[in-house]
Amino acid sequence: MKSRASTWLAWRHRLEYFFFRMIICLLQIQSPRRNVRVAESLAWFVFYVLPKKLTRYHSAKQNIRTAFGNKYSNSEVDELILGMWRHLFRMVAEIAQISRKLTINNFRQILSFRTRSGAVRALCSKRPVILLSGHFGNWEMSISVFGHFGFPMSVVARPLDNPYLDEWFERFRRHTGHSMIAKRGAFAKMAGVLEQGGSIAVLCDQDAGARGTFVDFFGHPASTFPTIARLAIEYDANIVVGYSCRQPDDFQNRHWVHYELGCEEVVDPRDFHGDGRVHEITQQFTNALESAVRRSPEQYFWVHRRWKTTPEEAQRQLQRHRRKAG
């Protein structure tokens, strides 16, 4: 017999999904120009009206200061954070419209390409590929484009707590031929895909905790998952660091948004040797992501606690774990 808590949770999930679908439907029927105005209004509300604690304003500001030091004034930092929210709300509207607006027949009107030759060579090399990006630009746009081009990926993502929302996003990612891998315990499935010569897509810019590999990100040590480098070495997979970055609007000459789809770097594990190659590869793809973010920092999700785990804290956690195990 179901408890009251589980019954309420099921109804809450249904209500969340109902309102989510209402919002998606409204966004789908709006013009791109109107959706821009909606995104700007919502960003203004989040930044100026909601409590700073609720929007993690101070975390975002601290992260920007950590990354850029005193490069920006306080007003410029605020403009970056406001721009981040504006970008994120626009991204939601674009995700709602991607399945209808972006096709194999019109992609040239929506996308321009930067250094695509490296990515094309990697994808056509008959070697496995790990497509890396971060919470930068419109990462969902990148995934959809590769599906349209005939390069299906196994997308690594954390399942959402709401099963109805999770199913919607899974259908969205599958509509161009992709499959899903749940983030928790993903190593074995990722290895299986690469062993078969397939490709995986994963975001690589979240804190990896005490067991991560520490590499420099904007000049500060950041705990990063070493899994990517280890898989690339073991399965001889090229690592393609890519991004999809929004460009200035031109609705008079374009029917939708304009994005630059870029390959920042291709990291080949064959170029690294010795015991330190996992660290070197991890640093290389982290440098590539940083380079992309520096060009359009307002399109990066600064509220993530990227530098949450310090090397000192990681050492303390590992020592406590060893004492408990012993």
Image (tube, helix red, strand yellow):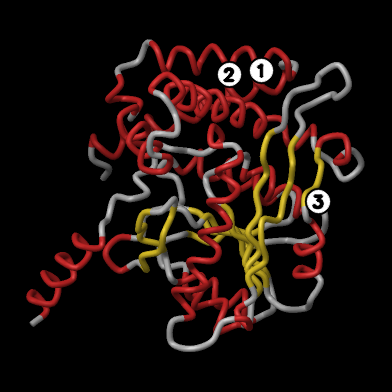
Circles 1 and 3: CB distance less than 8 Å? no
Above or below 136: residue 128: below
Task: Say the numbered circle drawn on residue 35.
Answer: 1
Q: Which residue is mark 2?
A: 39
**Residue 15 appears in the rendering:** no
What type is the residue that disc 3 sits on?
A: His
**Secondary structure beneath label 1:** helix
Quadrant of the rendered structure where residue 264 is? bottom right
**If the image is split into quadrants, where does the C terminus sit?**
bottom left
**Secondary structure beneath label 3:** helix
**Residue 62 appears in the rendering:** yes
Residue at 43% from the left image edge and 87% from the top image edge: 275
Q: Earlier in the sequence, mark 3 or mark 2?
A: 2
Residue 314 point in image, percent of width and height: 22, 64
Residues at marks 1 and 3, CA–CA distance in whole angstroms: 24 Å
Above or below 128: residue 175: above
**Secondary structure beneath label 2:** helix
What type is the residue that disc 1 sits on?
A: Asn
Alpha-carbon neighbours of circle 2 within 10 Å: few (<14), some, or many (≥20)? many
Residue 60 point in image, percent of width and height: 37, 33
Residues at marks 2 and 1, CA–CA distance in whole angstroms: 6 Å
Q: Which residue is mark 3?
A: 148
